[in-house]
Image: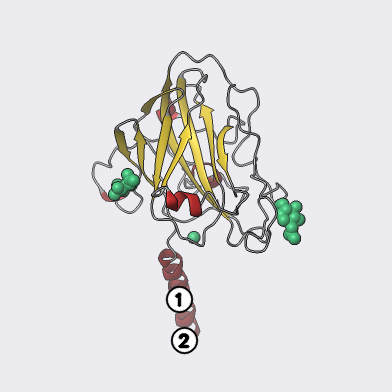
Amino acid sequence: MFIRFVAFTAAAALAFISTANAHGYVQDVVIGSTHYTGYLPYSDPYYDPVPERVIRPIPGNGPVTDLTLIDLQCNGYSAGGVVGSSPAALVAPVAAGSDVKLNWTTWPDSHIGPMITYMALAPSDITQWLPGTDAVWFKVAEAGKTADGLWASTDILSADDSIYTFTVPANLKPGQYLVRHEIIALHAAYEYPGAQFYPSCLQLQVTGSGTQSPTSFVSFPGAYTPDTPGIVYDAYTNTSAYPIPGPPVWTGN
Ligand SMILES: *[C@@H]1O[C@H](CO)[C@@H](O)[C@H](O)[C@H]1NC(C)=O
Ligand SMILES: *[C@@H]1O[C@H](CO)[C@@H](O)[C@H](O)[C@H]1NC(C)=O
Ligand SMILES: [Cu+2]
């Protein structure tokens, strides 16, 4: 009885520690002069009706570390019958060639690493679409460690008031696209599992007269394995260039 009590207390303490060890998520999206509040995991679920967002729901501010889980896609739940993510209700319009600004919650200084952005064309109504493990994703932006040793997160992100900006490729053909944006925190990435993935999925309606589409795609999970360069990396001792994981950026020339 006493031992059970101790075990329960230890579990409760662990739960507390993982809550207290706050990390983050995208709290706001800015396109042109329009702001869209991000999905707020600590308040949205408690509203009735639940607020409509352009970002898909996440369980909280914590990371995914298992590269085989569907959770790696959009930080969605793999429990409760929801596969990878559940769609959001809204879709944000954006002209191809425009900037999209993602406003992160205050990011811990220790959580250094790259910021990477992918897109995927929804084959039909994005508010119903789950990519599953299909290879549909192409990379549109990436930032790792500069030659001066500055990391996309936290150095550059903090200097930019927690705003990360990527550009929708100018020649991208119009359609509904799911954006998968992530920070990979490397503070424990000297082994696998260790790297912490913080993905966030945003629903966009790309407009314009673009005609181009990429021809090669990756899946999530699938694009990253423990052997992919940049997944295992000792960020505190390795002074070499950091190899950003995943395929090359597609710019649509
Ligand atoms: C980011 O979003 C927060 C919460 O909505 C807001 O208070 C803050 O001003 C935003 N930052 C910028 C630079 O817009
Ligand atoms: C530093 O990182 C590079 C790129 O991942 C890797 O090839 C190299 O082995 C690492 N060096 C050490 C000492 O771990
Ligand atoms: Cu953390």
Q: Of the residues shown, which amino acid type is indicated by label 1?
A: Phe
CB of mark 1 within 8 Å of CB of mark 2?
A: no
Pointer 2 residue Cβ closer than 8 Å to ligand 3 = no
Asked if ligand 3 lies within 8 A of label 1, the reply is: no
Between 52 and 217, the residue placed more toward the observer is: 217
In front of the other: 71 or 33: 33
Residue 155 badge: none
Q: Nearer the viewer, residue 215 or 159?
A: 159
Residue furthest to the bottom? 2
Quadrant that contains the C terminus: top right
- Image coords of residue 152 (percent x, y): 53, 49
Relative to 209, is 106 above or below?
below
N-term-proximal mark, 1 vs 2? 2
Mark 2 lies on residue: 2
Left/right of residue 55 with respect to residue 244 in the rendered view: left
Judging by the rendered image, the residue that carries numbered circle 1 is 8
Q: Residue at x 37, y 29 (%)?
A: 91
